[in-house]
Amino acid sequence: MSEKYYFIGIKGTGMGPLAQILHDQGNEVLGSDIDQFTYTQAPLEQAGIKILPFDANNVLDNQDAIFIRGNAFEDDQVEVQAALQAGVKMISYPEAVAQQIDQATTIAVAGAHGKTSTTGLLSHVFKNVAKTSYLIGDGTGHGVANSDFFVLEADEYRRHFAPYHPDYAILTNIDFDHPDYYHDLADVRSAFVDFAKGVKKGIVAWGDDPSLQNLGVDVPVYYYGDQAGRDDFLISDVKKTTSGSTFSVSFKGQDLGEFAIPIFGQHNVYNATAVIAVAYLEGLDLANVRAHLLTYPGVKRRFSEKKVQDIVIIDDYAHHPTEIQATIDAAQQKYPTKEIVAVFQPHTFTRVIAYKDEFAQALQAADTVYLTPIFGSARESKGTVSAQDIADALPNGAVVLKEDDVSPLLKHHDAVLVFMGAGDIQKYEYAYEKLLGQTLPDLN
């Protein structure tokens, strides 16, 4: 039986994919959000899902709908307030996701870093070998009626993943992030442990992370990594080339064969092994898994590439030191002979206060570093630190760019420019691409 759903904040990175899933399952779906264009709205428009501007009258016009409330909105938001006053049926985003979890064998991917990349890879492989619905944090969602599997990116921010009780969880790592909410690493770990205790069949966890040891759960925990004697899914014979990586995997001494991925960086070898592990535990044909790992196209804003003249431009969501390190490592693997230029937009003042020196340490791996002013948030519009504080911590310093003058980037030729950040770093990238276009030689 189909339902009508109205999403308050339909362009959210989780809300948009969930709207797509419910639409694909034959429900009537519409919603509201800000007028400003976001990359998450394109799939909604392609599906014919109506997006309205925020307005209290939208609630009155759609009182027959089940309202799904985005995590970002408090009771005083115009439509939330109207929905509460009208007494319509309204559930939270996590509650709506939990309803999907109950309908299929669910694999939730959680971790401070690597969630989106791993969920994307897992979704790609599973949708090609079984009936699979999926929700990825890059704005991508797809629903299948009577799915065998539901693949889900589970967000730890403000413990949003607390209501989820999946069959399996992939835990990529635990790190101190979101300092505006969590107090310290122990606080973050407590959230992950609480989530892990709700998993029903098994947990696949990265063995190198000490925070993922001794989770104290009742289901089996299978570790993946490259340490013999510790890891259940053991990686060996890793070979990295400019076209990707190949590696072998064994499970408790049983050889599962060689696998190859067309993506870069050691972190993606680990991510792929987590996917192989869950597929093996669910009895999927590893020959099909092997074939579809090779066809993975990537996800939005994760090492997305384009070429302009002799410049390779990479756009990546990396906004934490660990993610910056992984992204630069991937760029160096694919382009070992080119200059790697990092253009980083720090994201939120609290994160810079917590990680100034770690940002500098991670960025040092690049040949040249540029920074932009800090991108704040609705909760943090100003702070006591600046991008210059990170620049001062770098041994060779860094230029802090202005949006209206990215011309310093033009001095780099036959180089890889990696634009990284979770804010609006793309406006600097677009300004640079525009300048590059203006410097094209006149061929007439």
Image: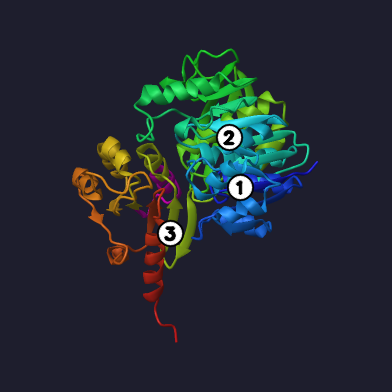
Residue at x 63% of width, y 59% of height: 45
Tell me residue 418's x, y (percent).
39, 53
Q: Residues within 10 Å of mark 2 (few under 14, many from 20)?
A: many
Circle 2 is placed at which residue position? Answer: 94
Q: Residues within 10 Å of mark 1 (few under 14, many from 20)?
A: many
* Span colored in magenta: 328-341
What x and y, as percent, mark residue 379? 36, 44
Q: Is residue 257 above or below residue 349?
A: above
**Residue sitting at x 44%, y 21%:** 190
User: Disc 3 marks which amino acid?
Assistant: Val
- Element type at marker 2? helix
Q: Nearer the viewer, mark 1 or mark 2?
A: 1
* Label 1 with label 3: CB-CB less than 8 Å: no
Residue 118, quarter of the rendered image: top right
Mark linked to residue 312: 3
Instruction: Give the vertical position of 74 relative to 11 (above or below).
Output: above
Q: CA distance from mark 2 to mark 3?
A: 38 Å
Inspect the image, locate mark 1, and give the three-letter code of the amino acid beneath it: Phe
Quarter of the image with the C terminus is bottom left
279 and 97: which is toward the camera = 97
Which comes sooner in the sequence, label 2 or label 3?
2
**Which badge, 1 or 2, is on the more N-terminal residue?**
1
* Nearer the camera: disc 1 or disc 3: 1
Q: Which residue is labeled 1 in the image?
A: 7
Q: Nearer the viewer, mark 2 or mark 3?
A: 2
Judged from the image, the secondary structure of the residue bearing numbered disc 1 is strand
